[in-house]
Image (cartoon, rainbow, N blue to C red):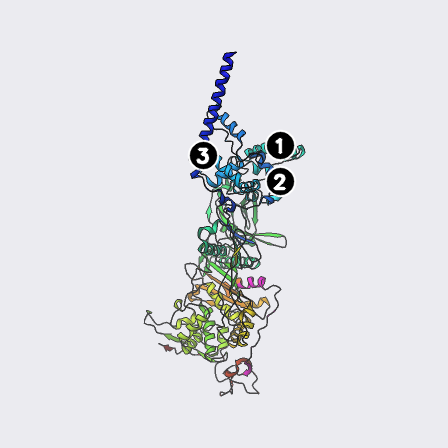
Amino acid sequence: MKRLIRLIKIGTIFACFSFIAGVLTLAAAYFYIKPGLPSVESLRDVHLQVPLRIFSRDRRLIAEFGEKRRVPLSYGEIPDQMVMAFLAAEDDRFFQHPGVDYKGILRAVLKLVQSGHRRQGGSTITMQVARNFFLTPERTYIRKFREIFLALRIEAELEKQDIFELYLNKIYLGHRAYGVGAAARVYYGKRIDELSLSEIATIAGLPKAPSSNNPLTNPKRAIERRNYVLRRMQKLGFIKPNEYNLAVNTPATASLHTPEPEIEAPYFAEMVRADLVQRFGKDAYTQGYQVYTTLDSRLQKAANDAVRRALIAYDRRHGFRGVEQNFDLVEAPTEQQWDGFLSDQKVVGGLRPGLVTQVFERSVTVYLGAGRSVDIEWGGLKWARAYVNKNRRGSALKVAGETLVVGDLIRVQNLSGEGESHWQLAQIPAVEGALVSVDPNNGALLAVVGGFDFYNSKFNRVTQAKRQPGSGFKAVIYSAALDEGYTAASLINDAPVVFDDPSLESAWRPENYSGKFFGPTRLRFALTKSRNLVSIRLLRAIGVDRALEQAEKFGFDPSDLPHNLSLALGSGVVTPLQMAMGYSVLANGGYQVKSNFIEHIEDGQRKVVYQASPLRVCDDCMLGRKEGLATEELAGPLQQVAPRVISPGNHYLMNSMMQDVIKRGTGRKARVLGRNDLAGKTGTTNDQRDAWFNGFHPDLVAIVWVGFDSSKPLGRGEVGGRAALPAWIDFMKVALKDVPEHPLQMPPGMVTVRIDPHTGQRASVDQQDAIFEVFRAENAPKESPLPAGNAGDGSEPTAFDTPEEIF
């Protein structure tokens, strides 16, 4: 008995000393580790890494940039079942313990003693927050002590709900999803409040092993882990037996849901991304910025469709260049093998890859993947005459086997209409194109298409392609001439010229596209028919320097333009966006606006950190200045008034002449739109290397360019009115739907006069073929010095064969 009492005393003394030693060890560890512990204060204002999101002006998602997918949530936004699922899976005593679960740690120590390996870490949710926010992933005892002490400090300074909110927003849950909000979207494409109990339990089972328990990469393990979480929830009384039975028998439904843009505008998105990086550096990708842009989703879709349709149409006019590849389907006869052939092929510009599996006399069967096959009938095949060169195709096809054989990898296009699908053979166009549309009243970009397909070529031809504008630049020359006293009725001789420039190897002999010369021609008629020689003589008359001054008013940089007479034919280099801003002057009444594409930017806390204040057209403001009113009283504090650069009279005459381009000139195909308020100008460069249509409505400018990136010729007949105008028409058909007519209003100081169409002078009272023309009052013709019909009228060929030399 004495011996037993003695052993008890010794044991008690040993336990006391052990306890004291343990306390002293913990105290020593705390004072050793304390200086290196980070401040918990930063958790009160934590900035989670949230990706950059870009939206259209109608609030539709355009793009998301950033490595981490995250949807930050407040504690109040997290469903109760989600909270209970994580408690059951990770730390059911979270709301009772002080940040460290001593029972859990004791279990972990016992496991360590029994097995010699750390199998159970005893980490609480608070300890995981400490680890995720402050510590490295190393597995050492020192780091574990740091984790424990940090958890205690966090619990002392933050509320339990705040800690849980940080945890559920920070935790990594696989597939770049950080936090439960992102996981709900990535795995189920839902908001967190739309998840079922089964889906909640699946997400709650991920923190332990987000890769091996992942419902996408290992569905079986994910279901096992989900069922474990559900059992724990039932055991803890969080769910009822019937809820458990329903959830545990629910099949897995997870699939990868990446942030799908609601609008296809990748060229535009890249412009915005680059702008944000310039403003905020790398923080642009992580601080949760939301950018609201000027892009119109309806117009963007119309622009995408219009450009692709025009480029495919051009491509088909020039023939089939052949299949992309051929596979031996005899050696690979199964659909699984065919899927392997197609796996590396992406959809390009809406054109799907497919394998020819059967060839009949006038049809083929094409395998599209995933067990699906379609038939292409003769109507979708017969266009594919062989490409020979830019001006020539092979003979018309008689049977499908002349162009396709089994095993060919091709592209197909689905033309759907009235509930029917019609498949056609297609090919990725070698030619490229661009379309940009802007609001001329403030310079806002409404639609941007920089090429046939961004993922096939990221080169943005709207902003980066510097090409010759051709005849599209004549609008600047004519506007300058009107300011110099010329009128729409002024006669300029359409006759041969020789341009002798020492910098050229030989004399330059420009011609009209037709190769003909038409004699004295009124400016209105010359612009309507795009007469090159009239433009050159007009430029010589007003002077190159004067034209360059006018070009600067239209927003062009004179240093990018030639300082010689070739300027009249658009031999400088400009981008489609520059052309859009130049033509905005003609559309908006004569004001120069600047291009812009961001309305405002919000940071991660939804605070506006940038608000655009673009130059805006404001006729009332210009009137108010004359009357001594402040600009802010008329335009508002955030609006800057665009400066007037051409007079109302100049604007009216240019619009009137350019409306004639569509009514009876090189843009007359656009009459199909059935509107009288459209104006524009075609543009074609030497050898048809560039094809343009630059057109506008008073509230909308749209520029279309078509050409090869290598600047090789487009081929005979591929002028602006053929290659580019169809895309403009298709776009404007959608853009102006239900938009009322906007008649051109004649400004004060203008008069209408009957003139002789042959001379441009005032017509006699009895002249039968007289026409009406508009003039500035001071430039109106006073009398007709020549008899009617004494000069060429610019409408019939006349012999003017002796070239005039111009030095």
Q: Amino acid at mark 1?
A: Leu
Q: Give the residue number, with chain letter if any, for mark 1.
A: 236
Q: Earlier in the sequence, mark 2 or mark 1?
A: 2
Q: Check contact, mark 2 vs mark 1: CB within 8 A.
A: no
Q: Residues within 10 Å of mark 1 (few under 14, many from 20)?
A: few
Give the residue displayed 47% in from the left and 66% down from the top: 579
| Mark 3–mark 1 distance (CA, rounded to whole Å) | 35 Å
What mark, if any, has residue 148 been given in the picture? Answer: none
Q: Give the residue number, with chain letter if any, for mark 2.
A: 80
The quarter of the rendered structure image containing the C terminus is bottom left
Disc 2 secondary structure class: helix
Q: Earlier in the sequence, mark 2 or mark 3?
A: 3
Against 365, residue 86 (above or below) is above
Q: Which stretch did the figure color magenta?
A: 728-754
Q: Position of residue 138 (x, y in %)?
A: 43, 35
Q: Give the residue number, with chain letter if any, for mark 3.
A: 30
Q: Residues within 10 Å of mark 2 (few under 14, many from 20)?
A: few
Give the residue displayed 62% in from the left and 32% down from the top: 236
Disc 3 secondary structure class: helix
Q: Residues within 10 Å of mark 3 (few under 14, many from 20)?
A: some
Against 452, residue 122 (above or below) is above
Is 220 colored magenta in this rendering? no
**Of the residues tagged 2 and 3, which is closer to the observer?**
3
